[in-house]
Amino acid sequence: MSKNWLISLIACASISSLSLPARGQAVLPYIPKLDSEKLELQGLQLLQDAVQLIRFQQYDLALPRAELATQLAPANSDVWFILGSLYVQQEKIAQGIKTLEKAQSLAPEQEGILFRLGEAYFQKGDYETAQEKFEAGLEIKNESPDALFSLGNTYLKLAKFDDAIAAYEEAFQMEATFWPALNNVGLVEYEKGDYDKAIAKWQSVIKVDGKQAEPRLALAVALFSEGKVNEAIKLGKAALKLDGRYADIKFLQENLWGEQLIEDTRQFLNNPQMQRVIANIEQFNPEQLPAQNQGVPIPQ
């Protein structure tokens, strides 16, 4: 952006704020003609700068660039999409939704915007609207495991258990290493009271990826509830060594563990052997691990 014309604008603004003579004979200050095409290009360059900063998780630096980009290129849906995504990432959910709705009005057939809106409404707790957005996006692009997984989470929140299982299983069929989808089928089955199916799913998840704490702890809780204490303690210790956050009930609730599984987990974690394990867990520092499921999507 050229400093010369910006300085001229500032000077003009200052001059125009002064009182004019009564007869109004003063000449209006000169305002240079702005090249709208050039301004849009500058806006898109700012957007690219913001995207690069997002890649390095420099969200605070990316935000003002994205905000200015919307002023310079207001007809471009990508600038509103990135800005709205940044607002959501920073938990400014209302601003994020408003901005993403603007992006959708400019590009109504862009499934990525609909998916991001679904995530924003999910964070807001408006699961009905989240469902609408995810389903609308999947009508445009139905081969999206991430979107199907998010839709499954939405169905789970709405207690539409069969729909949730169907969405998770479809996501897993598309991507055979997508263990969270298979894991969440176990969460649903447990809340339905079908503990054998839940146990089988978590055992399958461990076969797919044996380095994940969540299915190990969930399986440990289920086995503990069935009286298989020694096996459960062994699995529980291994799970918490992988990730100590899973000893935090609030963290489990954020990961969509249902009421019955949470209650059984409390009893399991109160076991004296597990209490000793928890006492020995080093203080978790979330800054040492990458953020999970909260990255800002970047248009390709």
Image (cartoon, rainbow, N blue to C red):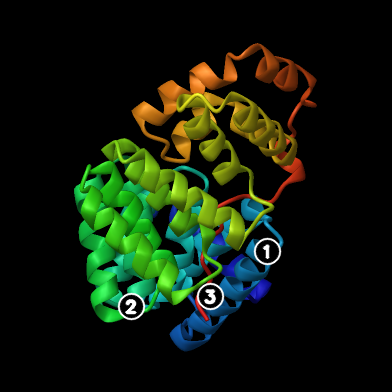
Left or right: residue 245 compared with residue 92: right
Report x, y in % for residue 171. 40, 68
Circle 2: element type? loop
Q: Is residue 148 left or right of residue 130?
A: right
Quarter-wise, where is residue 45 in the image? bottom right
On the image, the x and y values in percent for residue 121 come to 31, 49
Q: Which label lies toward us, 2 or 3?
A: 2
Q: Residue at x 56, y 68 (%)?
A: 177
Mark 2: amino acid: Gln
**Badge 3 or badge 1: first in the primary sequence:** 3
The residue beneath circle 2 is: 110
Distance of mark 2 from mark 1, alpha carbons?
23 Å
Image point 40% across, 45% down: which residue?
Answer: 198
Sort mark 3 into few (<14), some (14-19) or many (20+) by Cα contacts within 10 Å: many
Q: Nearer the viewer, residue 156 or 122?
A: 156
**227 or 296: nearer the viewer:** 227
Q: Residue shown at 64%/27% (left/top)? A: 230
Q: Indicate the secondary structure of the residue bearing disc 3.
A: helix
Q: Amino acid at mark 1?
A: Leu
Between marks 2 and 3, how big is the CA–CA gap?
Answer: 21 Å
Identify whether 265 is placed above or below 118.
above
CA distance separating discs 3 and 1: 15 Å
On residue 43, which mark appears? 3
